Every structure is written in structure tokens, then in C-alpha cells.
Image (cartoon, rainbow, N blue to C red):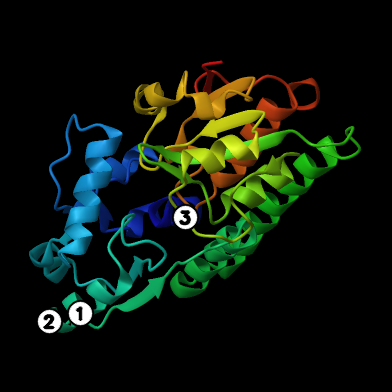
């Protein structure tokens, strides 16, 4: 998400290093990769990935690695990190320790959004750290306006709102927390099992069934649409989701998991899923209906 913010602020040429997951915009793939994964998970299913991550954390071992030689060669002036989720990216504490060992005096900016407003505010933090405050303010205003437009679009719809269960994992099921409940609310839905600003957490299938969802939105962390559809297999006919007349799979990596500008695209996508009569049908390259 930090990479996307940097490019959105017109600083792509100044960006020297990215994580192994940075793939947007496409130019990001041409940058030096300075962080990678410590896990070999190619071809692993959702349950296996969850087990591997849990085991690694239980052992006190890092999930991600830093290429210290590349960081030393780059000698960055600003380094963008996060402390929101140690499963999602390298924590800023690890980055600080590495910089100290390398004798690098880079300013570390930790982006740790919890709400949708926090996600947009993070753009301002990057703008301040990079001398692009004016660009950041313009982008933030544009994004807030788009969210307000969605809220206005779905305002006045008959109550109750559709009961929406956002999931970010399937085996075991995890709630999609943090800013996702705000996204659901802005798009005109009632978010289930994920209070605003709550962390993502594992759910019992009994609790899922008791919540009686009408619409399930599966946004598996770290998955683009094709991989997300494959990961949704355990959900297709799960009895705990029997009340849901709709099961949607979305491109989570692009529009939900990464707290950057495209989260607002995710709000617009949710509005299309929940209220196509107002927002128009969802873009099939961004969301697929399985039920």
C-alpha cells in the first residue's frame, strides 16, 4: 500500500526499493525488492498457510526477511513500514533494528491505519515525509469525495440494510476487520461479526451461522481475484452460510487488503455488489459471484 501511495503522489522515480508483494502500478515490479517471505507456500491451501504462519509466530520466528545488503546500497532517506499486522508485512521495529545495524539514518514512517479515514490520512503522512503535502491533500480530498458520493448514492434506501459478512480467510474463517467494516457501512451494508476498527480475528462456524448473513464477501488477504476464487472453494456449500443468498469473491489484494488509495475503489465495488440498482453491476474483473 505504501508503494501505491508513493506512486500516487508522483514519486515513482524516487522510489528505490519495494516488498516482494508490490505489484501496482506495474512499474513497481521494476524496483529493487528489499523484503521477502521466509515461508515456502507455493501451492499451499488456506488451512496449510494458516498453520504455517501460526507455527512460525509460535516459534518467535519472522515471517518476512529484509535484504540488508540492498538497503545498505540504497541508503534510503525515508523508509515506509507498518506495525498493523506482523502477518502482512515487516514490522517497523524490525526495520528500525536493521537500520541501526546498518548505520543507516533513514526516517522510518510507520503506516498503521485502523479505520477508512485512517487509510486516507496515511497518504498525508507519506506526503509530509516526502515533501508532497500539497499533492497529498488533493488526493485525500478526492478520495473523501468519492466515499461521500457512495454514501449519498445509497442514502435513503429501504431499511434494513443487507446483512453483510466480510471474510478475509476461509480455513479457518477470519473476519475482515480494520477498515473493512467502514467500507461495508459506506457502501450501504450492515457489517456482521466485525465491529468498526476491530482487528481481523478467527471465527467459529457456529457464530457465523448465528449471524445469519445475507451477503458474504470473501476478500482473502494477499489474494488477487483468480486465487481468491480458488480459495473460496470451502465456502461454496458450507452449511454455516446457508442463509446467504449471495456469495461474492473479490480481488482483495487490489481493493481491500492493502490500505492505500484503491480501498476507495473497494467501497465503490461493495456498493455495486450490495446495491446494483443504484451503483450499477460489479466489474467482473474485480468481483465474481459464486452464489
Q: CA distance from mark 1 to mark 3?
A: 24 Å
> Marks 2 and 1: in contact by CB < 8 Å?
yes
- Pointer 1 local density, CA inside 10 Å: few below 14, some 14–19, many at least 20: few
| Alpha carbon separation for disc pair 1 and 2 | 6 Å
Distance of label 3 from label 2 (alpha carbons): 28 Å
Near mark 3 (Cα within 10 A), the count class, few <14, some 14-19 or many ≥20, is many
Question: Where residue 228 sits in the image (x, y, percent)?
Answer: 39, 28
Kindly tell me whether residue 34 is visible in this rendering: no
The residue under the point 25% across, 78% down is 96
Whether residue 100 is visible, yes or no, is yes
Depth check, mark 3 against mark 2: the one in front is 2
Q: Position of residue 207 (x, y in %)?
A: 55, 43
Q: Quadrant of residue 163?
A: top right
Q: Which residue is mark 1?
A: 97
- Residue linked to disc 3: 5
Badge 3 or badge 2: first in the primary sequence: 3
- Residue 281: image x %, image y %? 68, 19
Label 1 SS: helix
Q: Secondary structure at mark 3?
A: helix
| Front residue of 214 and 122 | 214
Residue 62 percent coordinates (x, y): 18, 63
Instruction: Left or right? Give the position of 279 relative to 53.
Output: right
Residue 11 or residue 92, whichever sits in front: 92
- Residue 253 picture quarter: top left
Q: Which mark is residue 101?
A: 2
Sort mark 2 into few (<14), some (14-19) or many (20+) by Cα contacts within 10 Å.
Answer: few
* Farthest left residue in view: 69
Amino acid at each position: 500500500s505504501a508503494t501505491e501511495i508513493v506512486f500516487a503522489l508522483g514519486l515513482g522515480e524516487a522510489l528505490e526499493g519495494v516488498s516482494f508483494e508490490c505489484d501496482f502500478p506495474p512499474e513497481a515490479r521494476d524496483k529493487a525488492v528489499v523484503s521477502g517471505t521466509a515461508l515456502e507456500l507455493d501451492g499451499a491451501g488456506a488451512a496449510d498457510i494458516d498453520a504455517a504462519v501460526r507455527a512460525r509466530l509460535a516459534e518467535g520466528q519472522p515471517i518476512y526477511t529484509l535484504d540488508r545488503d540492498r538497503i545498505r546500497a540504497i541508503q534510503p532517506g525515508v523508509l515506509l513500514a507498518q506495525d498493523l499486522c506482523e502477518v502482512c508485512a515487516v514490522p517497523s521495529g524490525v526495520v528500525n533494528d536493521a537500520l541501526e545495524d546498518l548505520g543507516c539514518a533513514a526516517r522510518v514512517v510507520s503506516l498503521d491505519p485502523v479505520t477508512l479515514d485512517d487509510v486516507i490520512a496515511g497518504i498525508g503522512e507519506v506526503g509530509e515525509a516526502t515533501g508532497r503535502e500539497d499533492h497529498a491533500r488533493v488526493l485525500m480530498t478526492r478520495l473523501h469525495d468519492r466515499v461521500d458520493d457512495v454514501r449519498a448514492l445509497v442514502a435513503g434506501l429501504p431499511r434494513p440494510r443487507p446483512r453483510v459478512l466480510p471474510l478475509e480467510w476461509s480455513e479457518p474463517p477470519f473476519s475482515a476487520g480494520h477498515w473493512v467494516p467502514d467500507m461495508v457501512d459506506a457502501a450501504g451494508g450492515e457489517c456482521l461479526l466485525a465491529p468498526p476498527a476491530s482487528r481481523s480475528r478467527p471465527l467459529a462456524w457456529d457464530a457465523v451461522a448465528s449471524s445469519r448473513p445475507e451477503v458474504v464477501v470473501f476478500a482473502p488477504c494477499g489474494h488477487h481475484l483468480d486465487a481468491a476464487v480458488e480459495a473460496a472453494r470451502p465456502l461454496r456449500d458450507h452449511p454455516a452460510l446457508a442463509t446467504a443468498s449471495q456469495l461474492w469473491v473479490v480481488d482483495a489484494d487490489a481493493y481491500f487488503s492493502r490500505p492505500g488509495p484503491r480501498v476507495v475503489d473497494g467501497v465503490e465495488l461493495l456498493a455495486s455488489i450490495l446495491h446494483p440498482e443504484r451503483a450499477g453491476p460489479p466489474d467482473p474483473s474485480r468481483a465474481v459471484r459464486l452464489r
